[in-house]
Amino acid sequence: MNFIVIFADDLGYGDLSSYGHPTIRTPHLDKMATEGQKWTNFYVGASVCTPSRAALLTGRLPIRNGMMGNKERVLFPDSMHGIPSEEITIAEQLKKVGYATACVGKWHLGHKEQCLPTNNGFDYYFGIPYSNDMSFSGEFSSAEERKDVLGGSKETKSEYFNVPLLRNEKILEQPADQTTITKRYTEEAVSYIKKNKAKPFFLYLAHNLPHIPLFASKDFLGKSDRGLYGDVVEEIDYGIGEIIKTLKEEGLAENTIVVFTSDNGPWLSFDEKGGSAGLLRAGKGTTWEGGMREPCIFWSPGNIAPGIIHDLGATMDLLPTFSAIANVPLPENRPLDGYDLSPTLFQQKASPRDHIYYYRSTELFAYREGPYKVHFVTQGAYGQFGGREEHRQPLLYNLNEDPSEKYNIADKHPEIIARLQARIQKDTLSIERGKDQLRDRSGK
Ligand code: MG
């Protein structure tokens, strides 16, 4: 079985037509959602890029895999470190049984040579190694100007952002031309599939967009009713259509699983230039649902049992799921935070996952078990949704009845809060041990 993971950047829960967006057209993803499984309670490991990507690729919470961030929550062009070499990525797992592996797109787990995809299990890399708004070549005179330039209400040009485009470890282009980046990532993905059709492969396609600043190629610019953000999402969707078409033409559709999701919620401080979390509260950077619940579609005709899945799932489940399907034993010398979802994917059995941790850097802010989510600390992000609040009496929401986290039911259900807290104390023991390991490692 081949695996393709398509990871959007900062696309929100409400940004696909099949997840309720009224004007963005995403026919290819919508068709995959109908033919495959559409998950409505699917989560990422953190609400910003670096830790979220590390969680997906290692099957571990960011506080265990060393990419949790502390002062800065994500890596920057002057960061010297990246994903620790002891971490085992999905690519390294699948290589144990002879998979060909490629990463196309945004990496953001370190851009020094030892941290690049080619030193973390991938045979091939083509992409921008961090966020597309980094390395701005000018200076912003104010926060307002930054917002105007990044958000595009002042003229924004791709060359303002001095980001490199790499092939393997070499810089091909700097600044990367972002107006054609989505198109080129799609072409790379299509050509990789054609070249590797004879052996099992894992392709991780992590688009840099729709992270701000937004760029679309000529064929898509000005086409969407949703404006530039819609143009960008529609170009990504078109590219996914090309990938599906290639899989069908090459006779690979029935032995390939395609997964689509996003790394974190929408960047709401950029107003209409950012995406939408739909009915979920807040967005990127927060531990409210809008920051960490994402659209997720699994597609593989004849394999994935079609339907809408309300059970819990997370990006950290992909490593154990792919390992089970490809028959690779899990790494034994470390705790994992993922579950094998294949019985749900293939037979619609209940998901083995019953809880979600919501961390901000190293601190546990919230926890979900079944329908209930308890918040111990809440904090907005990027100047929105308020400052840090520590809740002496935790907030409690029933997400099945109240997906927008509007109605705090803590007063009515102290016994549920007590039950969730007991469960966390049990689980965090092993997480604390993970933190000690990190401390040892960083002291080296
Ligand atoms: Mg992101």
Image (cartoon, helix red, strand yellow):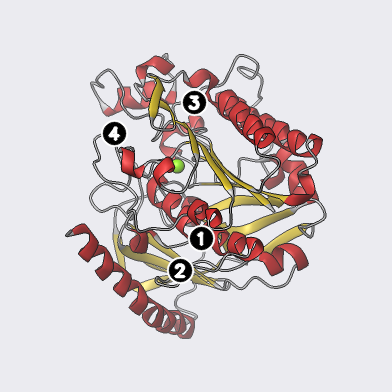
Label 4: element kind = loop
Disc 3: which residue? 214
Image: 110 above or below 352: above
> Dividing the image into 4 quarters, which one contains the N terminus?
bottom right
Where in the figure is residue 249, as x and y percent of width and height?
80, 34
Residue under circle 4?
77
Query: Please, what is the three-letter code of the amino acid marked with disc 2?
Result: Leu
How far apart are the alpha carbons under marks 3 and 2? 35 Å
Circles 2 and 1 in contact, beta carbons < 8 Å: yes
Q: Measure the C-alpha gap from mark 3 to mark 4.
A: 20 Å
Q: Please name the amino acid that badge 4 sits on.
A: Pro
Three-letter code for the amino acid on which mark 1 is drawn: Met
Mark 2 or 1: in front is: 2
Mark 2 vs mark 1, CA separation in Å: 8 Å
**Residue 363's image quarter?**
bottom left
Q: Which mark is residue 336?
A: 2
- Residue 316 tag number: 1
